[in-house]
Amino acid sequence: MDGDNNNHGAPHPVSIEQKKMCLDFMRKAYAMVDDPSTDLIISWGFNRDSFIVWHPPECYRDLLPRLLGVPDFYRFRLYGFKKVVSSVHLEYARDDFVKGRPELLEKIGQSFLEEREKKMKPLRDAMRNCKNMDEERLVTKEWMATLERERRVQVDKDFLKDADLLLLRISKYKERRAKSFTRFGGYYYY
């Protein structure tokens, strides 16, 4: 900027507040999965190193907004959680998110903050080359639009995966139902 001393390119130390926010979110997420009262909706996976969303609509509607203040699992993906592809259910896993090991949550927050800093470097580099506030606003606007496009692409991909899993569950349900229908000679018994 005209004569201003800017430090857009300098590494930005992670603040204590940022670390606290990350750790708070991970602790709340861990508590939600670990809470026996939520087991019908969300619980630990069979190997205790993932979590399964048994009833996604209830989870999206009731648990995520109330317990974590988020509408979906997008923030989990930001923290490095991946969908377990082989699962028939909606299942997420991440290293260091393990039942009985809450002390590992700090590592998740730290890696999230490090990854975020890496992603911010190109923006800081572009901002360093700006000559005035108008250029900075334009660069920031373009950067935010790019991030939003990437987020939407990821949400669309996840939606399609979720739809595929739902169709697979419906298909398996129909197969079981057809087998039981033929087992009883084509009659339903109540």
Image (cartoon, rainbow, N blue to C red):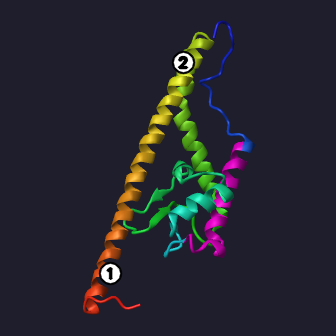
Classify 94 as above or below 131. Answer: below
Element marked by disc 2:
helix
Exactly how many numbered labels are in the figure? 2
For label 2, the crowd category at 10 Å Cα-Cα, with few meaning under 14, some 14 to 19 and many 20 or more, is few
Kind of residue at badge 1 = Arg
Task: Please give left or right for residue 63 compared with residue 82 in the image.
Answer: right
Q: Is residue 125 visible?
A: no
Residue at the location (56% across, 49% down)?
75
Q: Is residue 64 visible?
A: yes
Highlighted magenta segment, given as a residue range: 18-43
Q: Main secondary structure of the magenta part?
A: helix
| Disc 2 from disc 1: Cα separation | 57 Å
Q: Earlier in the sequence, mark 2 or mark 1?
A: 2
Per the image, is 67 magenta?
no
In front: mark 2 or mark 1?
1
Return the residue at label 1: 176
Classify 38 as above or below 136. Answer: below
Q: Quadrant of residue 189?
A: bottom left
Return the residue at label 2: 138
Q: Measured from the top left, where is residue 134 in percent x and y?
A: 59, 12
Task: Please give left or right for residue 172 compared with residue 77 in the image.
Answer: left
Residue at the location (56% across, 14% down)?
135
**Closer to us: 10 or 122:** 122
Element marked by disc 1:
helix
Kind of residue at badge 2 = Leu
